[in-house]
Image (spheres, rainbow, N blue to C red):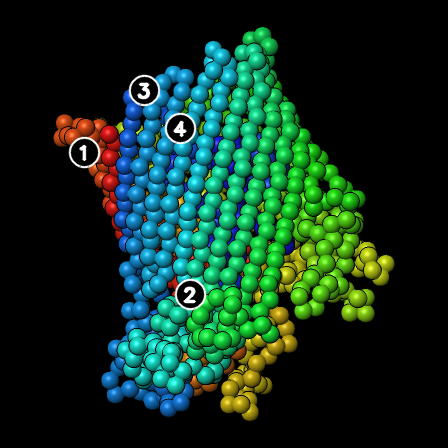
Amino acid sequence: IAGDNNVLYVVDGVPIGNDNRSSGGRYGRPGGGEGISDFNPEDIESLSVLTGPSAAALYGASAANGVIIINTKKGKEGKTRLNFSTGLDFFTPFVTPQFQNTYGNEAGSFRSWGAKLATPSSYNPVDFFQTGTNLTNSLTLSTGNKDNQTFVSVGTTNAQGIIPSNGYYRYNFSGRNTANFLDNKLHLDLSANYVLQGDQNMFSEGGYYNPLTSLYLFPRGEDASLMKAYEAYNPARRIAEQNWPHLVQREGFFTENPYWIVNREMFTSQKKRYMLTANVKYDILKWLNVAGRIRIDNANTTVEQKLYASTTRLLAGSEKGSYTNSNDNFNQTYADFIVNIDKPFGDDLHLTANVGTSYEDRHKTGNTMGGRLFHIPNLFSANNYDPSNSAPGQVYSHTRNIAVFGSAELAYKRMLYLTVTGRNDWASQLVNSVEPSIFYPSVGLSGIISEMVKLPSFMNYLKVRASYTEVGSPITQVGITPGTVTYPLSPAKGVTPLSTYPFPDFKAERTHSYEVGVNSRWFGGKVNLDVTLYRSNTVNQTFLSSLQPSSGYSGFYVQAGNVQNTGVELALGFEDTFGKVNWSSNVTYTRNVNLIKELVRDYLNPVTGQRFSKNDLEISGAYLREGDQIGDIYVEGILAKGEDGKLIEGKSGLYEIDRSQRIKIGSSNPDFTLGWSNTINYKNFSLSFLLNGRFGGIVNSGTQAVLDAYGVSKRSGDARDAGGVLYQGERYDAQKFYQTIGGEGLMAYYTYDATNVRLQELSLGYSLPKNLLFWGVKGLKVALTGRNLLMIYNKAPFDPQVTASTGTYTGTEFFMVPSQRTLGFNVKVEF
């Protein structure tokens, strides 16, 4: 309900920090990418997904939403190998809004509801976009003998986005050494990674700091070419100022010159991150070993925001500009010690077990200084802050988790497997609460039917499995239990009272999961079919509930709720060789049904001592109700009708709105997703493609609503050409209609089917024959690649698969950067 649904990333057996800068929403600056994006893709050897009991036992609460296992490359025994790869991709907008260019604006108005133009405007907002590029290079070296292997890599990424001034770079340096000692009983694995990553103007969505707002809304009757001269010298102030006739608030928006936004509202960040990992394993006996791992992960991020003089005061707060500088430091230390057993007992029984303990410490600090510029315009320095407006800020977060865990799998005749796990966590978020530790078990049973009975000749393998898993998660908030409570402190106000009531009776969030599945292979292994059915219930979730102001607090944390997810995952694969052609094809189908079974029932208010219940609540801008799904979209406001069934024109000249009820219009969740991937190999050629579809669900477009209200959308122009909007059999004035539903943001009229089907990926590769290689080259492969090449079906005015965040509540876009079509090539050379 109030947490996140992010998976845990585990690299070489160790969980990694995956913090990201959150998005500022509709009116803030965009965030940054996840921590996993810091890795060089050329360093990755394999990737797999881990769910169920194994994930919970090994990695605890962080694995409640699943685990992505990443194994990186290491040195190999034999001759030294040198590999170089380079790739260049080109990006262009994929799905963009449709505009009208036949109606202009009236003098002094920013809206295009004026008379029809004598000559249609040639202005096309899409021309603002540039062709984006992404250049990647990677150089790897692998060498080693039987007892010692080394792998070293260097990678570079330099990208320019489709919006001018948007850029990104990343430089990766990594090394890994694996060695065996003491007659191959002691195994040592050491690795080090360093990442230097930076970006500039990472646009996402929003009404401000976003060039698309004024770019899309620019009046069609004016000369758009003039906006390219985005600044003009003011001799009185002796500085260049923004050149934009619509800088004053006009009809709902503080618009700015889009070229000013990309060149004079600068948002830059730089991250320096290093990771050091050590893994030691000692084989005591053939069936017994002990292993210890430790990783230190440190990331330092510096962020700067520079708003030049004449940026709207709404954002800069001053005619001289503003400057903000922040520095964040994230540290994670993870260590574990595990005893592993892998022992047969006679010919029938085999035990695989482990028992261990882990320690994880996450520490984040940050300092921010920002404010209006005071003395000299555009001098971005802390010495130039307005002392009445600037103040330092500091963030601090520290969590720690200690765990003991164990798992055992007993196999009988390699046909029947019983798995049991257990884990106990001591999380710092629950210190001094009624449940300072969390224990959660799991049990699984699987049987290989093909080993038990004789199956028909066309069925080669059949396995059935079932499991029950319980995962406990500490509360996500820190500093709200006795002994950890922190009080807000600011230079102006000093120590201020807490607004949220500190409540000691916190318990862990619990997820109970049941899963059954079948794995099968058919027709000599050419066909495989895997089916998984699951159901999970998450209870005891933590979210805020309001309190009466007379209590002295604004709210308190409630622990309640029961959210159920039921679903099916199906994978059908085929692989065969036809002469010199090898064809591999896979179809995946997923369906998940979400249900809010319970919110708050008979809960004790810790302040008043009274019990209360809630069957609905609002959180993160979403409305939740028992019996609904998380993702259901509600709207308030529809067009009011008179007794004659027609729309009612109000005193303002617009149509009246009925806001008397809240209406559910659908869910942002898809009914199901379907993917079809194919790889065809013929001699030295390789062709692969992926068709991907999302079926069902709805999305809302805030962009389309504003475009309609300002009269720049294609459908507003089409409606004017037709003499008005045809709505429920009656024709209404287009301007009044669209300024009512669009200007008031009546999302009931901006809801679209989210179903979309596309050719998502296409790749054609060729490996040069070895007899044509020279200069010590042992292998050379070239490939042409494409992504989002063709949208086969889509009814929404934007790409429904593009989202502004990875949060729980999605389905609405607002001047979002368009999705992108990618064309490129890459070359891989082995020496």
- Tag 3 and tag 1, C-beta contact below 8 Å: no
Q: Residues within 10 Å of mark 1 (few under 14, many from 20)?
A: some
Residue marked by disc 4 = 74
Task: Give the farthest residue toward the top.
Answer: 346
Q: How crowded is mark 2: few (under 14 residues within 10 Å), some or many (20 or more)?
A: many
Identified at 38% across, 78% down, the residue is: 239
Q: So how many labels did they put on this image?
A: 4
Can you tell which mark lies on residue 78?
3
Q: Is mark 3 on a helix, strand or loop?
A: strand
The alpha-carbon separation of the residues under discs 4 and 2 comes to: 40 Å
Name which residue type carries label 1.
Answer: Leu
Can you tell which mark lies on residue 473?
none
Lower position in the chain sequence, tag 4 or tag 2 = 4
Name which residue type carries label 4.
Answer: Lys
The alpha-carbon separation of the residues under discs 2 and 1 comes to: 46 Å
Q: Give the number of the mark in front: 2 or 1.
A: 2
Question: Considering depth in this image, is 759 or 396 the residue closer to the camera?
Answer: 396
Q: Is mark 1 on a helix, strand or loop?
A: loop
Residue marked by disc 2 = 266
Q: Give the number of the mark in front: 4 or 2.
A: 2
Question: Considering depth in this image, is 725 or 278 the residue closer to the camera?
Answer: 278
Q: Where is residue 297 in the image (x, y as percent from the top left)?
A: 52, 40
Name which residue type carries label 2.
Answer: Met
Lower position in the chain sequence, tag 2 or tag 1 = 2
Q: Give the number of the mark in front: 3 or 2.
A: 2
Q: Position of residue 796 (x, y in %)?
A: 41, 64
Name which residue type carries label 3.
Answer: Gly
Residue marked by disc 1 = 768
